[in-house]
Amino acid sequence: MIILFIGPPGAGKGTQAAQLAQKISVPHIATGDILRDAVKESSTLGLKAQGFMERGALVPDNEIIDLIKKRIIRSDCNNGFILDGFPRTLAQAQALGDMINQTDKQVDKVVNLEVPDSILIERLSGRRVCRQCRANYHVMNAPSKANGRCDKCSGELYQRNDDQVEVIKERLKVYKDQTVPLLDFYRTQKKLLDIRGESSITRTFRSLVETIGLA
Ligand code: AP5
């Protein structure tokens, strides 16, 4: 099964995609995570991507398309995969369609997670992430027990550079300008599933699996 997650920053794409990937036993491929690893390693891709990410802009299509091409041909994707944060532009969606058309597979479902802007800003500006295991916390809603340390692995918690309010606003603008047009692209193909993502993580997941037909 091939499932795509689209939604504004902070909608819960990563949270829901990770749980769904576990449920259906396919890899969860998050372009944001791959790019952050590349930045950490100061790889060629990381050095190119860093400036775009820090100001809330999209990394150029050719870099991202190349990254996905190389990732989805790996053998762990033979039975499908979940893409979280890709595609984000029409050019990326068309390139993905071309890649998948060369196989006997298809994009099965496209999840559109909908959450109001005010909730997104609150979620992202309070988010803290573990440097080691990537677990997510929130300073008010889900704080770690030990101050500044991860409850799961004791790793250091940090605030993403792009989780500053001004950058969050830019990311939301970029989402509306460049990614929202994809919703019609996939709606026309009858693949789009609109899921309300403002309730709890558990309730949203329940609604997601029911809508996909996996309950
Ligand atoms: P990326 O890392 O993908 O950032 P994003 O899309 O802005 O998404 P987030 O990770 O911020 O949010 P999310 O929707 O995954 O929510 P999450 O589950 O984490 O991309 C970063 C950057 O990389 C981009 O800005 C761009 O520069 C570049 N990039 C990436 N892909 C690209 C592409 N295809 N093309 C070009 N450039 C690309 O949840 C957020 C928080 O809310 C967490 O703290 C979580 O615990 C909490 N939360 C989640 N669900 C709930 C809930 N139901 N109730 C309460 N809290 C919740």
Image (cartoon, rainbow, N blue to C red):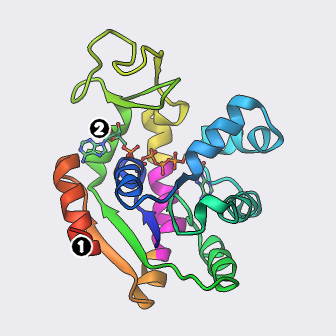
Q: Which residue is mark 1?
A: 211
- Is any atom of residue 56 visible in this view? no
Pick the front one: 160 or 150: 150
Quadrant location of the C terminus?
bottom left
**What is the x, y in percent for residue 170?**
50, 48
Q: Main secondary structure of the magenta part?
A: helix
**What is the x, y in percent for residue 179?**
51, 67
Identify whether 171 is placed above or below 135.
below
Q: Amino acid at mark 2?
A: Glu
Q: Is residue 130 magenta?
A: no
Identify whether 30 is placed above or below 207.
above
Sequence order check: which comes first, mark 2 or mark 1? 2
Pick the front one: 152 or 161: 152
Give SS at disc 1. helix
Pick the front one: 198 or 122: 198
Which label lies toward us, 2 or 1? 1
What is the span of residues highlighted in magenta in the rendered image? 171-182
Seen at 19% across and 49% down, the residue is: 202
Give SS at disc 2. helix
Is disc 1 surrounded by few (<14), some (14 to 19) or many (20+) residues within 10 Å?
Answer: some
Q: Is residue 193 left or right of residue 106?
A: left
Identify whether 37 is placed above or below 215.
above
**What is the x, y in percent for residue 80?**
52, 68
> Mark on residue 190?
none
Q: Is residue 180 magenta?
A: yes
**What is the x, y in percent for residue 180?**
45, 70
Seen at 37% across and 38% down, the residue is: 124
Q: Residue furthest right?
A: 44
Q: Which residue is mark 2?
A: 122
Q: Is residue 74 left or right of residue 85?
A: right
Identify whether 12 is placed above or below 181.
above
- Is any atom of residue 110 visible in this view? yes
